[in-house]
Image (spheres, coloured by chain):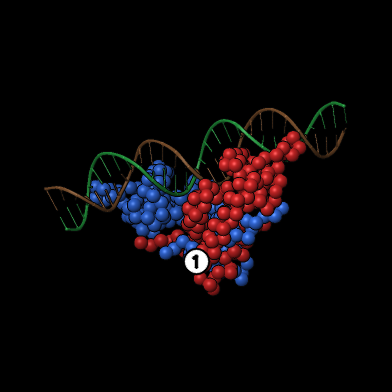
Chain colours: A red, B blue, C brown, D green
Amino acid sequence: MKDPLLDLPGYSLRRAASAMMAEFAARIEPLGLRIADVSALLVIGANPGVTASQLGRALDIQRANMVPLLNRIEDAGLLTRRPLDGKSHSLHLTEAGEAKLAEARATIATFEDWLVNRVPPPHRDHLKPALDALWRD
Amino acid sequence: MKDPLLDLPGYSLRRAASAMMAEFAARIEPLGLRIADVSALLVIGANPGVTASQLGRALDIQRANMVPLLNRIEDAGLLTRRPLDGKSHSLHLTEAGEAKLAEARATIATFEDWLVNRVPPPHRDHLKPALDALWRD
DNA sequence: ATGGATTGCTATGCGCAATAGCCAAGGTTA
DNA sequence: TAACCTTGGCTATTGCGCATAGCAATCCAT
């Protein structure tokens, strides 16, 4: 069957992202985490005390959608919210959060290696710069 | 703020795909179509008479999810379902469907050019092969 | 002819994102 | 200081894409 979609870079991007997200979600699920959780843990871990809105801006997640995300990882005992000035809250990982983050980092490293190694060597080093040009301003 | 995500090719892939899909959805929305609709129209247009399940396999969309998709473009008068053998249906574009597909193709061409040209020339030709390696078997 | 596979479908749920609106707290300007 | 606008966190709702489970009818292979 003819498939005109196979000529479209945009379609390749869509399918590749979908496949890789499914793979990563499967690898991170045993840790009890979702993809969005992992991204939040990484940023909080690298920036203890960030506020929820700062985190949302970094992840490009709306304020409204940060709420259930932070609730979930707080309920899991990975995160504490501390009132900062009566309006903002600062976010910090608990010890369990730090431990979970360490596990996640190992999973991420393995996954990223696996992903990059799927790309044939001649193209490998071009993938990330090309992708970054598509979304970073 | 430190952002460890920016070093991860997988994250770049996720963000790039999200950004490009949003852009394409915005460009195709004036035609009254969604991204999934366009992919279906393209494949049906190139393969008149395909069955719904063949189409679903090409697009990697579950049978169950094909139903509302095909209903929608049929209700829009773009598609006819013809009984093929009492079990399968063959799919054909109507004249309106062909016309809409022609419009969509123009939008797609413009979009794909725009997308590819966002990638700096040194990386440009590597993007699609790299992406294809991530999802095509 | 029987059993297994396929087709199209309903129903339902999940994950992620978007919008509109609310209230309290901060910042800015008159 | 008072009025104003903005920001932060939140609720509630919606949409989209995708997944699973199950069903009835049909086709196919042994």
Residue B64 shown left or right of residue B121 in the figure:
left
- Amino acid type at circle 1 is Arg
Chain of the residue displaying label 1:
A
Residue A77 position within the rendered picture, expressed as x and y whole percent measured from the top left: 60, 42
Residue drawn 48% across the image and 53% down it:
A26
Residue A88 position within the rendered picture, expressed as x and y whole percent measured from the top left: 72, 39
Residue drawn 60% across the image and 59% down it:
B8
Labels in figure, total: 1
Residue drawn 54% across the image and 61% down it:
A110
Task: Classify 10 Å Cα crowding around label 1: few (below 14), some (14-19), many (20 and above).
Answer: some
Residue D4 shown left or right of residue B128 in the figure:
right
Q: Which residue is mark 1?
A: A118
Residue B72 position within the rendered picture, expressed as x and y whole percent measured from the top left: 42, 43
Q: Is residue A122 visible?
A: yes
- Which one is nearer the viewer's eye here, B92 or B123? B123
- Which one is nearer the viewer's eye here, C12 or D2? C12
Residue C3 shown left or right of residue B103 in the figure:
left
Image quarter hosting the C terminus of chain A: bottom right
Q: Residue furthest bottom?
A: A122
Q: Is residue A127 above or below residue D5?
A: below
Q: Is residue B23 visible?
A: no
- Secondary-structure class at tag 1: helix
Residue D12 position within the rendered picture, expressed as x and y whole percent measured from the top left: 56, 30
Residue drawn 60% across the image and 54% down it:
A102
Image quarter hosting the N terminus of chain A: bottom left
